[in-house]
Image: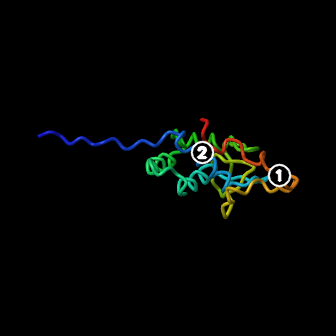
Amino acid sequence: SPRATVAPPPKAPDVSAWRAPAEDWCRTWLEREANAKVHVSTVRDKFAQSTTLPTEGAGPLRVAFKNSKSKPSKDFRDILKALPGAQVKDNIMIDKKNQIALLHYRLRRTPRPLDDTDEEAEAAAPAGDGGEAAAPAGDGGEAA
């Protein structure tokens, strides 16, 4: 009798499918703070548990994120490295755990609304200037 073939596990979607939502999530949940630090795995786990993941491939992406050496995990780390003023460093001790950490950022307890731009920039801008420059670069996701 023919042997049943086992389908390979579904592959995690390419970063192009989730880069823009991940960048938006980072702007919403991460806050710049001079001496702050948070483990990359902590940020990645919180992102993986969010509803931001693309519905298509969310399961395989969550599985891949559990492995810090997977391609999606490395892609996520690159997104964190691209944050303004961010630094990703090895061997950072937080709560007796020595891991790769994101420096100069902390996780917020509550999400910042996406339409809320940087408070300082907003306070410095004169009122009624049209706000054309207020949109963050690359927020549309049309150009890859």
How far apart in space, not on screen, are marks 1 and 2 (Cα)?
A: 23 Å
* Towards the viewer: 4 or 41: 4
Quarter of the image with the N terminus is: top left
- In the rendered image, which quarter is residue 144 located in? top right
**Measuring 67% from the left and 48% from the top, which residue is drawn there?**
101
* Towards the viewer: 136 or 128: 128
Residue 121: assigned label: 1
Left or right: where 4 falls relative to 69 = left
Which three-letter amino acid code belongs to the residue tagged 1? Ala
Instruction: Tell me residue 60's x, y (percent).
Output: 44, 47
For label 1, the crowd category at 10 Å Cα-Cα, with few meaning under 14, some 14 to 19 and many 20 or more, is few
**Mark 2 element type:** helix
**Measuring 86% from the left and 52% from the top, which residue is drawn there?**
125
In this rendering, the count of numbered labels is 2
For label 2, the crowd category at 10 Å Cα-Cα, with few meaning under 14, some 14 to 19 and many 20 or more, is some
- In the rendered image, which quarter is residue 108 located in? bottom right
**Measuring 75% from the left and 49% from the top, which residue is drawn there?**
104
Going from N to C along the chain, the mark reached first, 1 or 2, is 2
Instruction: Tell me residue 126's x, y (percent).
Output: 88, 53
Considering every residue shown, the one lying at the far top of the view is: 144
Q: Which residue is mark 2?
A: 20
